[in-house]
Amino acid sequence: MNDVALVAVRWALYVDLGLLFGLPLFALYAPGGGRMVQRHLPMVAMVAGLACLALLLSALGFALQAAAMTGLPLTQPDLSMVAELFNGTSMGTALKARLVALLVLLLSIPFYRRQSRPAFIASTLAGAVALATLAWSGHGAAGEGEAGWLQLGADLIHLLAAGAWVGALAAFLALVLTRLATDDLATEDMDRVMLAEEALRGFSLVGTIIVALLILTGTVNGWFLVGPGNIASLGQSTYGLLLIAKLLLFAGMLGLAALNRYRLTPALAQAIEEEDAPRAQALLRASLVVEGGLAIVILGLVAWLGTLSPPMSM
């Protein structure tokens, strides 16, 4: 039961911390990002809620890991052992860094409206640190020597690239989920749709960089965790089956991203010019919902994979 709870908490942390990094980052690079956040996204409530949830999930996740390592029930912890894990292990150091980063993030929220860009920069950096700490609870920190640093670096970049993609998806969804009336478009709703189209169009370069980083770092991680000699036998282990499922879902996300970029976003731009946006928006909305759903499932698989022994460790 503890294993299931640990995977669930890790899954929630991947989603939560990915959004905490990706949303403020999106506000920095998206065309009209600052204006969009100020007028159309409840950024203060979203980031504050995510940060508070991350604090709770981090405490629960650490308690579950401590229980698993000590072999004691969650309700009967060995406090001296918990203190030793918190103060004398890389896992504890990562948790401390995450807590500090989340505190910085919370302190930056009041400045979103008055000094939005510096506040978003501070939030992005703090979110990056918080998200990066997850590498120390998985296989990325298991290596040694120069190869170990390469593996850890690849894992960190992989986490940040995934967080940037998740944050962008969340921002796009928040904009296109607005329902437009066919006959009388509200000015506010239309402004949101135009901003969504502009941001989606401008995301092409950033999206390409994100995908390239995910593929490159994923290949490096696969080399260390799976190894070329184990590729043919991936289907014979739970780890291999989950990895195959993750790769297939990632391919699905790439296909939807290409559809959004080359077909649905241009179609929305044309529909806006022709004052017939609702249908084009509905198609784009459906595609983004599916893409976001795939991202959440992939993060769940990543959380599960982190609790299993990869082929190279067997």
Image (cartoon, grey):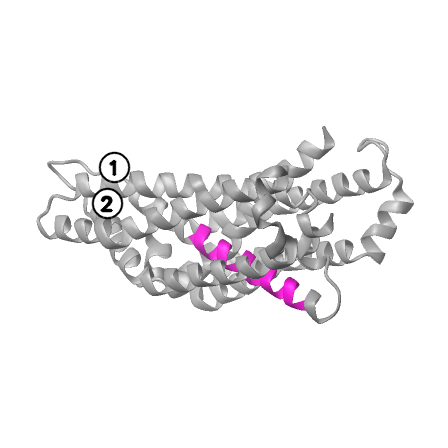
Judge the density around disc 1: few (<14), some (14-19), many (≥20) Cα neighbours within 10 Å: some
Q: Nearer the viewer, residue 288 or 313?
A: 313
Q: Residue at x 64, y 58 (%)?
A: 224
10 displayed left or right of 290: right
Across and down, in percent, residue 40 comes to 33, 50
120 displayed left or right of 234: left
100 displayed left or right of 125: right
Mark 2 lies on residue: 189
Q: Nearer the viewer, residue 74 or 155?
A: 155
In the image, residue 165 lies in the stretch drawn in magenta: yes
Mark 1 lies on residue: 179
Q: Nearer the viewer, residue 183 or 148?
A: 148
As helix, strand or loop, the secondary structure at mark 1 comes to loop
Q: Residue at x 64, y 54 (%)?
A: 225
In this rendering, the label closer to the viewer, 2 or 1: 1
Residue found at the very far right of the displayed protein? 80
Q: Earlier in the sequence, mark 2 or mark 1?
A: 1
Across and down, in percent, residue 288 comes to 34, 43
Residue found at the very far top of the displayed protein? 1
Q: Is residue 107 visible?
A: no
Pick the quarter of the image with the N terminus: top right
Amino acid type at circle 2 is: Asp
